[in-house]
Image (spheres, coloured by chain):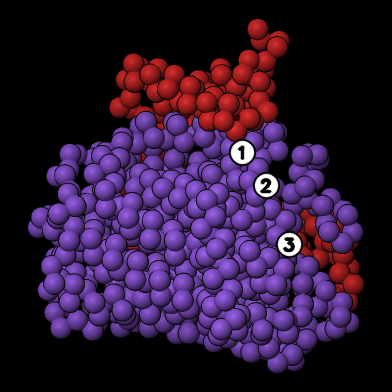
Amino acid sequence: MELLTSPRYKDYCGGLILVIVGLAAAFQAQSYQIGTLTRMGPGFFPAALGIILAAAGVVLLGTAMARNARTAVIEGEAVRRHPPEWRGWACICLAVIAFAVLGELTGLVPATFACVFIAALGDRDNSLRDIVLLSIGVTIAGVAVFWWGLGILFPLFSRDFM
Amino acid sequence: MWQSLMDLGYGFGLAFEPHNLFWCFVGVLVGNLIGVLPGTGALTAISMLLPLTFSMQPVPAILMLAGIFYGSQYGGAIGAILLNLPSHPPHAVTCLDGYPMTRKGKGGTALGLTMLCSFFAASFGIIVMVFASPLLVAVAFKFGPPELFSIMLLGLIAGSTMSRGSPVKGIAMTVIGLLIGTVGTDVQTGLQRFNFGIPELADGIELVSIAMGVFGIADFLRHVNRMKHIGSLAPVRFRDMRPSKAELKEAFFPMLRGTLVGTLFGAMPGTGPTITTFIAYALEQKVSRTPEKFGTGMIAGVAAPEAASHSKTQVDFIPTMSLGIPGDAVMALLLGALLIHGIQPGPRLLTEHPDIFWGLIASFWVGNVMLMVLNVPMIGVWVKLLQVPYRFLFPSAVFFIAIGAYSVNNDIFAVYEVLAFGIFGAIFMALDFPIAPILLGYVLGPMVEENFRRALLLSRGHLTTFIERPISGTIIGIIVLLLAAQAFFAMRARAGKGTALPVPPSDVIA
């Protein structure tokens, strides 16, 4: 992963993604009737965009190759600025998923608490006490602003849960 | 001329209605607050608060959103000057001389000057807007589908290539944005495109989901555990903020030049705010008699970029409102907000919704006055806020984003959409792609497609229609010139002769 986002390889990675997404979009758009320039079908515009995107990917790959061919690998010079932050990623993603799942199953209050709690776990400096206090605080504020203040349609506790 | 002034008077009448005045105040206050908080800029602020405006009337809603925008710019400068922390990329360049001023004990003066320059530049931008918009509208009425397509193309290409970083990557991101815009029901045939069998995608992807995903969640994914810890600060008092006469004199011409740079760049579609401030700074360095002193706390290095960013902010509204073509991502977001309220920006906005247009202009001025007044007593509070740790900030913001996405349609599916776009944005950011063009492409996408299809239908499939019609042809010519100029500068930079733009102190995702 660090290798993929290193200055030397990230353009390969980016270019490849663009080519794949572009071709996939163009391929999918074919099934929507492309039509002619005079009478364009719904597939014309997306297909054209897909091809442009794939072309941009090829250009990016090409320039990256040309640049890497010119500069030799210098060992030890690659300064790794950011080690991957898996804990933060996992916690933030889980927090959003928890909000969605718990929101549907149990209602706004548990969902909010879980969302803030899990997201806060993502930061290494947070102590458990801080996290609990923060979660309670945000839950109260969230209910006050959204449920009471703005009248959002979201049960505080869903009926099945109680 | 007189007509414009009369209309402006009408606008002031609207802006001073207590209801509108209140929301404008809320907007600038919240914008200023969010701008001060580390790691959040105008885009995050507007995306998070957009769902709250859905239940409001269009006029107060747009006044508030615009207030958030320029309010956050006032706030952003505070972090840049006092902490060397560019909470919003356009302010990165302000750090270069603003922070050295703080270290010399002149932080208060720098803030005071910034506020004066911002106010001057914003007022200038507003005046330009009052007189230029009706002129542009007169031209815009001659626009047919080919012209609209060409000018949108100009906006997209300028937006994707004029930002910092690789132009190819910018174009790729714009195209991805356009593709995202095609998701959902095709307007002309009713066919479902790219819905992957998910019925929720039939109406297309929500603007709010994209914006909060790529500017909110993606930002947190990038910054978690990486935000620098902020130590204690020397308190700034109102007394320190008053610049001396000599300092005012020193700041005057840079402020004027910065304002002009910002006005010029605001009028050009697609030039981002970051590039504008960098060019204003580079210009000051060029004309200065002591260029080597830049970076050690020059007043000009603070005054010019801040003035440029504020005049650009106001002038940016001209193409957005009168042509319906947003210049950058923030404008795209505001345009999307107007569309959600059922208002189509464009030449007809001035006659159909004069309340929105003139009310907005008048509220800019009212809002800027409020910000000036607000920042003087509140500066102590802002300084305290700067020290809110990121570890408390982002979990609260994650919740705010999740519930904001839900509230758009009272639909849990949007929450998953936000997450998907967040991960997508973070991956592309890690690969050094600019993120803002996605939004520009997404908002313009449906309009680009519609006008492209219509233009070719009218011309019976002849692509030459875009070149043959005089206005459209001129715009295409400008696009070609723009690309040629960029190729030329890229070549020159490769030959090692070009002057590079100044490098901001910490890593900035522009």
Which chain is drawn using red?
A
**Subunit ID for the residue under disc 2:** B
Task: Give the percent coordinates (x, y) of residue B490.
Answer: 42, 79
Q: Element at badge 2? A: loop
Q: Amino acid at mark 1?
A: Ala
- Placement of the C terminus of chain B among the 4 image quadrants: bottom left
Task: Give the percent coordinates (x, y) of residue B340.
Answer: 69, 52
Circle 3 crowding by C-alpha within 10 Å: few under 14, some 14–19, many from 20 = some
Q: Quadrant of residue B468?
A: bottom right
Read off the residue under disc 3.
B446
Read off the residue under disc 2.
B206
Task: Give the percent coordinates (x, y) of residue A140.
Answer: 48, 22
Read off the residue under disc 1.
B405
Residue A52 visible in the displayed image: no
Q: Nearer the viewer, mark 3 or mark 1?
A: 1
Q: Amino acid at mark 2?
A: Glu
